[in-house]
Image (spheres, rainbow, N blue to C red):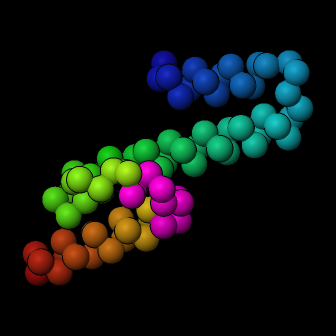
Amino acid sequence: MSKAHQNWQYLLKKPELSTLEKKQNLLRMAVETQKRHLILRLMSIDDYAHQEDWLQSLTLTELEHEWYLAKHRSDDQIG
């Protein structure tokens, strides 16, 4: 079981949290997981390799936009 999955399981079972708080925590964890995924993908591209601090400062929407731009730049270079 992954660490993120274990954290989600813990949050769901935590009795002092309301259902809304549990859902907010799950959403926050999902956003942070997606952000980490995109940052790692972007850092694997030479243009972004040494920009981790800047990437960490971006929102999920901004990271998705950077990924879109990077993907289309690589598509343009290929064909």
| Most common secondary structure along the magenta stretch | helix
Residue 27 point in image, percent of width and height:
67, 45
Compared to residue 34, the image places residue 54 above or below, namely below
Q: Residue at x 22, y 76 (%)?
A: 73
- Can residue 38 be seen in the rendering of this structure? no
Q: Residue at x 20, y 58 (%)?
A: 45
Q: Residue at x 76, y 40 (%)?
A: 23
Residue range corresponding to the magenta coloring:
54-62
Residue 72 point in image, percent of width and height:
27, 76
Along the horizontal axis of the image, is 45 left or right of 59?
left
Q: Quadrant of the C terminus?
A: bottom left
Compared to residue 26, the image places residue 47 above or below, namely below
Viewer-side residue, 79 vs 48: 48
Residue 74 point in image, percent of width and height:
18, 71
On whether residue 56 falls in the magenta region, the answer is: yes
Along the horizontal axis of the image, is 70 left or right of 75?
right
Return the residue found at the far left. Answer: 78
Compared to residue 48, the image places residue 24 above or below, namely above
| Image quadrant assignment for residue 64 | bottom left
Along the horizontal axis of the image, is 10 left or right of 19?
left
